[in-house]
Amino acid sequence: MILTTQRKAMIDELKKLKTHPTADEFYEVIRKKIPKISIASVYRNLDVLSKAGHILKIETSGTQMRFDGDLSRHYHLRCSKCGRLIDFMPKGVDSLEKSVKDLKKRNRNLIDFNIEFSGKCGKCE
């Protein structure tokens, strides 16, 4: 994958956001920086960048895919009231991650895991 100027700009803009936008929401943001970008280019490049590991694609059943520029180890909490997705790193998650790593060593069919927490965000509490 070639990291074009457009893709670099998309990564930089996504890293600034803490909202975990959908592709459509991100299109509205990136258009301010790259006015001539098409919605198709945004969808295609978000897919390419996520497959290359430059950004995260957050997929959960029943919701639109969201994207995250933060590649650090963290989880997400989906607000059960407003649907907002926020970064979340609960205490005690280290032991869960260790258990999954041990399970992956014993079971080669297990490739990865994804945990999403549900609750109320600070605005809805």
Image: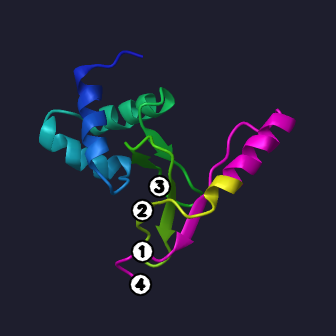
User: In the picture, residue 3 is in which quadrant?
Assistant: top left
Q: Earlier in the sequence, mark 4 or mark 3?
A: 3
Q: Would you name the residue on which mark 1 appears?
A: 121
Closer to the camera: disc 4 or disc 3?
4
Q: Would you name the residue on which mark 3 appears?
A: 64
The residue at the far right in this view is 106
Residue 86's label in the rendered image is: 2
Please name the amino acid that badge 2 sits on.
Ile
Residue 86 versus residue 20 in the image, above or below: below
Circle 3 crowding by C-alpha within 10 Å: few under 14, some 14–19, many from 20: few
Regarding residue 107, the answer to whether it shows in the image is: no
97 on left or right of 18:
right
Distance between mark 2 and mark 1 Cα atoms: 8 Å
The residue segment tinted magenta is: 96-125
The residue at the far top in this view is 2
Please name the amino acid that badge 3 sits on.
Gln
Q: Would you name the residue on which mark 4 appears?
A: 125
User: In the picture, residue 45 is in which quadrant?
Assistant: top left
Task: Assess whether mark 1 and mark 4 are in contact (beta carbons under 8 angstroms).
Answer: yes
Distance between mark 4 and mark 2 Cα atoms: 14 Å
* Disc 1, SS: loop
Task: Assess whether mark 3 and mark 4 are in contact (beta carbons under 8 angstroms).
Answer: no
Distance between mark 4 and mark 3 Cα atoms: 24 Å
Task: Assess whether mark 2 and mark 4 are in contact (beta carbons under 8 angstroms).
Answer: no
Circle 4 crowding by C-alpha within 10 Å: few under 14, some 14–19, many from 20: few
Which residue is found at the position 57% from the left and 65% from the top? 117
Quarter of the figure that contains the C terminus: bottom left
96 on left or right of 15:
right
* Disc 2, SS: strand
User: In the picture, residue 7 is in which quadrant?
Assistant: top left
